[in-house]
Each structure stands twice: as structure tokens, then as C-alpha cells.
Amino acid sequence: MPGVRDVSIGFNVAPPYSGAEESAVDISGVPRGENQPVRIHSVSPDYFATLGIPLLDGRTWNESENSRGDFVALVNQSFVRRYWPNLNPLNGQLRFPELQVVGPLDAMSSQAKAWRQVLGVVGDARNDGVDHPVQPAIYIPYTTLIPPYAQFLVRTQAEPLSYLHAIRAAVASIAPDQQISNGTFTLEEALERDAQYSRQRLFSNLFGVFSAMALALALVGIFSVVAYSVAQRTTEFGVRLALAAPRAHVLWVAARIALVSTGIGVTVGLALDTFIGTILAAWMHNAFAATGLVSAAVLLILSALIACLLPATRATTVPPAEALRYE
């Protein structure tokens, strides 16, 4: 269909992964007693492109392998870190001796419980909510186990729900008797309905408001202190101008106050914040994002520069004799 970028199919594989299957797994090179249940996602090979999950190593299965549903699998980074930290995962094998799905099945591949070759490694997708670290996960062809209901994941170029009628028509043109659920939703709607994501979004918004207030107070404080300090030197600026100092030199003298004091403060602050942020990121099993930190540092530096240059500019525009009589 025009406007549709990617389409994939799977079972309970749309975020926030509330219905992901778990099963015991035999892993080559790992004693059975050390194994723990892992997340199993039954998907088509286009699933990773649809959700933007990067393929880090190896390849996905092809259409021929997908039609059989046997002998192949992909794993995520968390799986490799836990079970194969010092091995090449592409040489590994695994199987699900107890693989089963609660409820009826429309089909099951003949070798669903046989050993599978790991074809590749994909990036971690947060599959256990935002409060917990990513769980080890294995991706297998959706043709391994086919329950009565499947999910189609569609990535579009425009508003997704605007394609809904055309998608229904396309399915009906292939299988007129195929029923399509009314439970169609966008990824954003699915996350908004999830309690964990909603709670964390509220906390994030609150912290964002408090952080913005703290930054605003810091900006006002820096502006006031530096502007007062520069204003106190108005007489000095008048003397420099009376001695034929260029106005650019006077502005540089004023800006030097911000460059030194603010530079030291921002450098110390960045070092402390990066150190604390790295610890918190490791504790929360998340990535440390420095974008907001750099933006705040830039705002602080600009605020200090403006606080210096505004009173200095005023001092350079008054006659030297008047500046000398200032206070």
C-alpha cells in the first residue's frame, strides 16, 4: 500500500509487551541449572524494522526459514550479556524443550522444540516496563506457534489511523472471511493506556517542571549577581574610556567576569552531574542522556554573558566624565 513503510506480524509483541510468553530454555555452553525463563517473541523477519530495533550482528531469517519456523532464532543484547558474555553468539544454539502456549493453536511447526541456530543479535527493547531492566529475550519465527489471534504492526508515513480503512480493504481483498478486531490502536495510545508508562510519564513531567524552575532561579541569580558586579565597575569603565580604551576592550573586560566565574562553576557542575548521572543510569539500568545537561550549561553561560554585557554596554554609551561621577 502507498504510504506504508513496514509491516510485520506477531503474537503479543506490540509494546508494552504485556502478554509476552516465557519458557525455560536450553542454551549451548550453559548448564541447565543456571538457565532462567526468558521472554519469547514470535515475530516475522520485518518486525525489527517496523519497531526500529537495530540488528547489531548477523542477520534475520529469510522467507524460506520463516515458512518452516524451525531451527533459527535471534537474541537481544541482554541475553548475550547474561548467558554468552565471552562467546560469539552466532556460534550458539538453544532450544525450548517445554515450549507451549496457553490456549488453542491453529498450527505448530514440526521441529518447534529442536535446537535452533542463533542467526543474529538485536538491540534491547524495554520489554519489562520502565521500572525494571530489559529481560533476556529470544525472537523466533511466528510460524513456530500460531494461536488463533495475531497482531499486525504497521509503520506508516502519515497518521496511522488514516490508513485503517485501506488496510481493512486490502485484507478483505485477500481473505474476505478474515475477521479484523476493532481493537486497533497506535503505539502512542498503547503506551498511554499502560499504567506503568503513565505513572512514569507523570513523574517525568513533575521532575521536568521542578528542573525548569531550578534552572530559571539559577539563571536569575547569575544574571543579578554578575550584573550587579559589573555595574559596580562603572567608574572603572569610565576611567578606561577616558584613557582612550576601545569600547570592545571594555566589553571584553566585562565578559571576562562571566567566562572565568561561570566557566569554573559550569565545569565543576558538569563533572559532578555526569558522575552522579552515570551512577544513577547504572542503578536504573538505563542510558545516561547528556543532551539536557549540555543545554542547561549553555543557558547558564549565555545568561552570565548577557548579565555582563548589558551593564557594560550601558557603561560604554555614557560619556566618560559622567561614568567617572557614577556613585
Image (cartoon, rainbow, N blue to C red):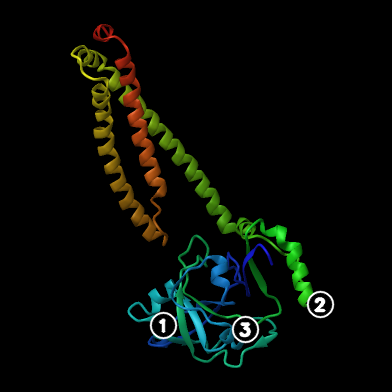
- First in sequence: mark 2 or mark 1? 1
- Residue 49 pos. (x, y %): 54, 69
Residue at the image point whose x is 34% and y is 56% from the top: 279
**285 lies left or right of 152:** left
- Residue 164 pos. (x, y %): 73, 62
State whether residue 298 is above or below residue 57. above
Q: Which residue is mark 1?
A: 90
- Residue 178 pos. (x, y %): 78, 76
Amino acid identity at mark 1: Leu
Amino acid identity at mark 3: Thr
- First in sequence: mark 3 or mark 2? 3
Which secondary structure, mark 1? helix
Residue at the image point whose x is 29% and y is 9% from the top: 319
Alpha carbon distance from label 3 to label 1: 22 Å
- Name the residue at the right extreme: 177
Alpha carbon distance from label 3 to label 2: 21 Å
State whether residue 13 is above or below residue 252. below
Residue 143: numbered disc: 3
Amino acid identity at mark 2: Asp
Residue 177: numbered disc: 2
Alpha carbon distance from label 2 to label 1: 42 Å
State whether residue 76 is above or below residue 208. below
Which secondary structure, mark 2? loop
**115 lies left or right of 239:** right
Q: Is residue 283 visible?
A: yes
Query: Dots 3 and 2: beta carbons under 8 Å?
Result: no
Residue at the image point whose x is 54% and y is 51% from the top: 201
**131 lies left or right of 325:** right
